[in-house]
Image (tube, rainbow, N blue to C red):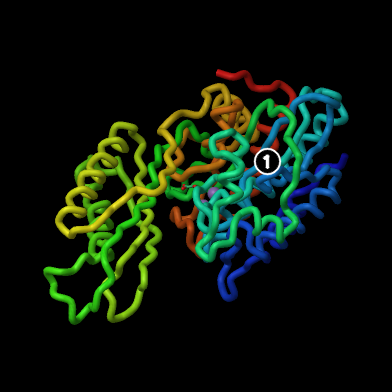
Amino acid sequence: MNAIADKDFLRHWDELSQFGAVPGTHGVDRQAGTAADGEQRKWFESLLTEHGFRVERDAIGNQYGLLELVPGAPYVLTGSHLDSQPTAGRFDGAYGVLASAHACLRAAAELGESGEAKYNLAVVNWFNEEGSRFKPSMMGSSVFTGKLPLETALNTADRSGVTVYEALGKLHELGDFTMPEVASYAEIHVQQGRSMEADGVTIGLVNATWGAHKLEVRVTGDQAHSGAAEMADRRDALLGAARLITAARDLVDDFAPGDLHTACGEINVYPNSPVVVASEVTLLIDLRSPHTEVLDAAFASLEKTIAEVSERDRLEIEIIGEHRWEQNPYPENGIALAREAAAELGLTHDRVMTVAGHDSTNMKDVAPTVMLFVPSVSGISHNLREYTSDKDMLAGLAHLAGVVTKLAKDGLDRE
Ligand code: GLV
Ligand code: MN
Ligand code: MN
């Protein structure tokens, strides 16, 4: 098999970046299960097929490209996600999927001829990593790793009531494939932070993930005339939600600088009408920390605030959904393997934590996992202006190919 060159990667990258492109920008809008997602999946399937992969999809729409080098052997799986947030950058996830496909081809070219491969190779495009249209995030890898029941995921509806099952069915992206045994997993991603750029590091060896606790909260009050109703009579759901939003921000100041990040990224107001006191609001609060005890304390404090706001403003406030992952490490033997691959290529590298969640956050709990970063200019992410240079993308691809080759040849023990 012929290895494909850097220029082929860049050409494929330009093609991929056209799907869901936002006019006048370098960014994209291709949320999970939308038409743009369907189009990029079909394009990816053709690309894989043309290059000798067998393409499959499973019951939650994870898309796989398999290259069998050693019949019957387990697989080195590598990938990320093609879906995006609304009006987002083109790198988040998509870079990792395309780099993984190319890395598999490079590893196959190197190992195929020498007969040194111990494992097969596969690329994966995980369904709905972003969780913007269908919550929670990391849906495909959560189902794959048994953390989320398939039925729950398929029955999850977007804001207009369309379920995952319906959206994927319409795109013909539901399958019945079961991925064979995974010997190890590798993922590369843009950093979405600015420390690597500041430190002049090309390859990030991800050694741990921050913990996250995401809450979906429903505030229920009573609809009223926003002018006529007596102030004392009001049960204003939007007022309660506003107090929770500012409380989440103020929480940050109760901890050491850098120990807690918080935000409310989504709010839905009913009836959301000019002369009406809102009767119901749902909001999403996101708490992140590199320390489990900080995350626990922040959550406990927010629960207390919920009780206080509920009493003060005479509202019912309920946590109706939660998604949490813990602060925990990536395996040290994977970091050592990745460090060796970077040193062989003469690439600067350093250990770095991931603040954002990734599908590898799930995968590392079931398979030996390597997580890698390349720099993000100014750390801008979930933004149309997200940017990583071609030079860094190509360095990351060379590195990932080295890592995948080592994984396929030598394997990685479970720590
Ligand atoms: C990813 O799902 C994240 O929330 O960081
Ligand atoms: Mn991502
Ligand atoms: Mn993202």
Among the 4 quarters of the image, the one containing residue 149: top right
Image position of 276 (left or right of 350)? left
Looking at the picture, tell me which residue is in the foreground, 311 or 384. Answer: 311
Q: Secondary structure at mark 1?
A: helix
Can you say which quadrant of the picture contains the N terminus?
Answer: top right
110 lies above or below 158: above
Residue 266's x, y, as percent?
40, 60
Looking at the picture, tell me which residue is in the foreground, 283 or 209. Answer: 283
Among the 4 quarters of the image, the one containing residue 260: top left
Residue 365's x, y, as percent?
54, 28
Residue 400's x, y, as percent?
65, 38
Mark 1 sits on what residue? 398
281 lies above or below 176: below
Amino acid type at mark 1:
Ala
Q: Name the residue rendered at 44%, 53% in the picture.
A: 379
The yes-or-no answer for disc 1 within 8 Å of ligand 2 is no
Residue 413 appears in the picture as rendered = yes
8 lies above or below 345: below
Q: Name the residue rendered at 71%, 31% in the picture.
A: 76
